[in-house]
Amino acid sequence: GQNIDQPTEMTATEGAIVQINCTYQTSGFNGLFWYQQHAGEAPTFLSYNVLDGLEEKGRFSSFLSRSKGYSYLLLKELQMKDSASYLCAVMGLTGGGNKLTFGTGTQLKVEL
Amino acid sequence: DAGITQSPRHKVTETGTPVTLRCHQTENHRYMYWYRQDPGHGLRLIHYSYGVKDTDKGEVSDGYSVSRSKTEDFLLTLESATSSQTSVYFCAISESSGTGDNEQFFGPGTRLTVL
């Protein structure tokens, strides 16, 4: 089975940098995803890591260490619109389809 | 944005009644998924499909059935709705299951309330 842990809530200041951690235990691993979800809306894809290291996409970066079962999402130059829930999800190795197991999400609040 | 629609967007029903939710895609993606999202639990997979007439169970499939008779439509049925099935239901699609083009795109969600 899969077990994914991430902090429930975080608060940060506009313009600052915030790191959201995710640890996982899994019986099979085929990649880790980060999604952003604003209140009342659908999750939207942010990043995908399958190899160790850092993937950078503009203000957002995601890091993966498979040996440690650890990932983080780094958000730079925070904006008020970044206030949202950030979901970590692990893709397991299965016979059909890429089944994602989601963490419960980290609610990020960006303050002035 | 990926072309995914869900219907209805909101529904209130009574315990014991059947309910069908529809997910429609215009992307011709092979894989389709149904999730429910509840406070404290995050997104949980109910059922998924890896092709027309090919479906499999997810983590929380009890009380739910699905059907996929054509590529673009994936139906989720609650045969006899219970209050524990009150939730927000999301449909998702993906093009592949490998290590490329495998991100899932989500529909807008359906808020279901069972009284």
Image: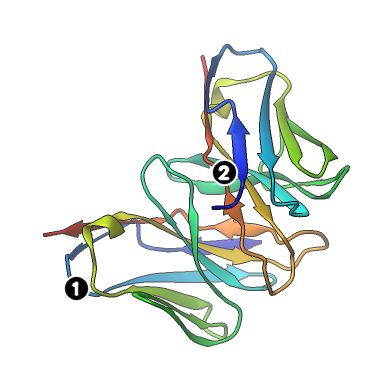
- What residue is rendered at 29% in x and 59% in y? A82
Identify residue for label 1. A16
- Residue A30: give x, y in percent of width and height: 67, 73
Rendered image: mark on residue A106: none
| Residue furthest to the left | A112
Which chain does tag 2 point to? B
Is A74 on the left-hand or right-hand side of A4? left
* Residue B29 placement: quadrant: bottom right
Question: Is B9 rendered above or below residue B39?
Answer: above
Q: What element carries label 2?
A: loop
Which chain does tag 1 point to? A
Q: Is mark 1 on a helix, strand or loop?
A: loop
Question: Is B23 rendered above or below residue B56?
Answer: above
Q: What residue type is labelled 2?
A: Gly
Is B78 on the left-hand or right-hand side of A23? right
Question: Is B67 rendered above or below residue A10?
Answer: above
Cα separation, mark 1 vs mark 2, equals 31 Å
- Residue B63: give x, y in percent of width and height: 71, 29
| Residue furthest to the right | B53
User: What colour scheme was applied to this rendering of the protein?
Assistant: rainbow
- Residue A18: give x, y in percent of width and height: 27, 72
Q: What residue type is labelled 1?
A: Ala
* Residue B14 placement: quadrant: top right
- What residue is rendered at 80% in x and 47% in y? B56
Along the viewing direction, whichever of B65 and A75 lies nearer the viewer: A75
Is A11 on the left-hand or right-hand side of B94? left
Identify residue for label 2. B107
Question: Is B94 rendered above or below residue A48?
Answer: above
Is B78 on the left-hand or right-hand side of B69? left
- Residue B9: give x, y in percent of width and height: 53, 28
Instruction: Tell me whether marks 1 and 2 sit on the same chain.
Output: no
Q: Are marks 1 and 2 in contact (CB under 8 Å)?
A: no
